[in-house]
Amino acid sequence: MKVTLLALSPDTDRQNWCEIGRQTHTGRRFFIPRIKTATMSKTFVGVDRGKEAWVAVAFDADGYDHTALFEEIGELWQAYEETASLILVDMPIGLIEDGESSRECDELARSVLGPRSRSVFTPPVREATRKRRYPAAKRVSERKTGGSLSKQAFAISDQIAAVDDLLRNVPEARATFRESHPEVCFRAFAGEPLQHSKKTAGGYAERMRTLASHDPDAPPIVQAVAESTEGAKVTVDDVLDAVVLAYTARPGFGKLRSLPAEPPTDTKGLPMEILYRSETPLVE
């Protein structure tokens, strides 16, 4: 198992970390979170999928705790299964088998995002996530729902299937992992739709203002998360997404809510929902 946490800062308390290796040419040391006992603080985790790894940002009762990178979702679960109260992941969980081509939660998310509605894509049906080639997955989607399949959705099919397999096979993980969407979380914190893509300078500034208005300590936390991923293929928007998911998971401002308010479940019993945190519902 290869789990990587990029080098900790010199002033970090090492008692909660296990050293797993050292980079010979630089002397940098690498760590993973040490499993905490039940008497220690519970963890609230936001998880975004980067190009090569799952980016996990964790808060405990005192605030920001750490950032970790994992190659596989099962490895992430192993690291947090004893401590996590809630793990919010930017990945579709409840999946359609056939019939309707889209989920209500995705339609509602698009309705509240305004100019950013295109950031919500329709996930593949469950069978399509197991196909290795796009044409085959597209044919399955057309046969099962009458709708097509975007290449964007197909590109993360492996990760959707990995989360699906974990939650279907591990009941404890099912109770801890919930689906969210960073753009919905930013929308809820901002109180209005954001105007710019997160991949632009204007979009970065917009999201940083939103986080800072939610928590004045957010800008240095974003900086700390970014520094923790140094040397890995993690983008700025991966960092922002994982941070806003972690803030949403952590108890505090407002109430944890879902789109829709009473989410349906798929044929495997997994909820088709998108969680967010706000004082009032985004949809009445």
Image (cartoon, rainbow, N blue to C red):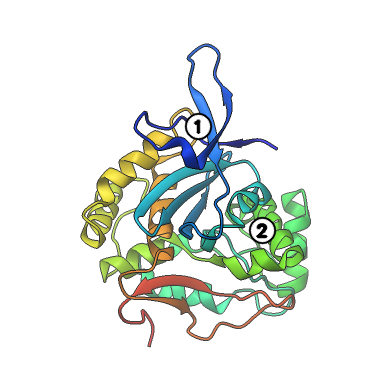
Q: How crowded is mark 2: few (under 14 residues within 10 Å), some or many (20 or more)?
A: many
* Residue in front for this viewpoint, 169 or 48: 169
* Residue in front for this viewpoint, 30 or 108: 30
Task: Pinpoint residue 49: horizontal percent, then vertical percent.
Answer: 54, 49
Residue at left offset 69%, top offset 73%? 96
Rendering quarter of residue 71: top right
The residue to which callout 2 is attached is 163
Task: Pinpoint residue 45: horizontal percent, then vertical percent.
Answer: 48, 56
Whichever of labels 1 and 2 marks the residue nearer the N terminus, that label is 2
Q: How crowded is mark 1: few (under 14 residues within 10 Å), some or many (20 or more)?
A: some
Residue at left offset 38%, top offset 36%? 12
The amino acid beneath tag 2 is Val
Which residue lies most toward the front here? 39
Residue 63 visible (yes or no): yes
Residue 201 visible (yes or no): no
Residue at left offset 38%, top offset 68%? 251
Residue at left offset 37%, top offset 46%? 199
The amino acid beneath tag 1 is Ala
Q: What mark, if any, has residue 214 been given in the picture? A: none
* Residue in front for this viewpoint, 187 or 141: 187
- The CA distance from mark 1 to mark 2 is 22 Å
Q: Quadrant of the C terminus?
A: bottom left
Eyeballing the image, is 224 above or below 263?
above
The residue to which callout 1 is attached is 232
Task: Pinpoint residue 253: horizontal percent, then vertical percent.
Answer: 30, 70
Assign a secondary structure to mark 2. helix
Q: Are marks 1 and 2 in contact (CB under 8 Å)?
A: no
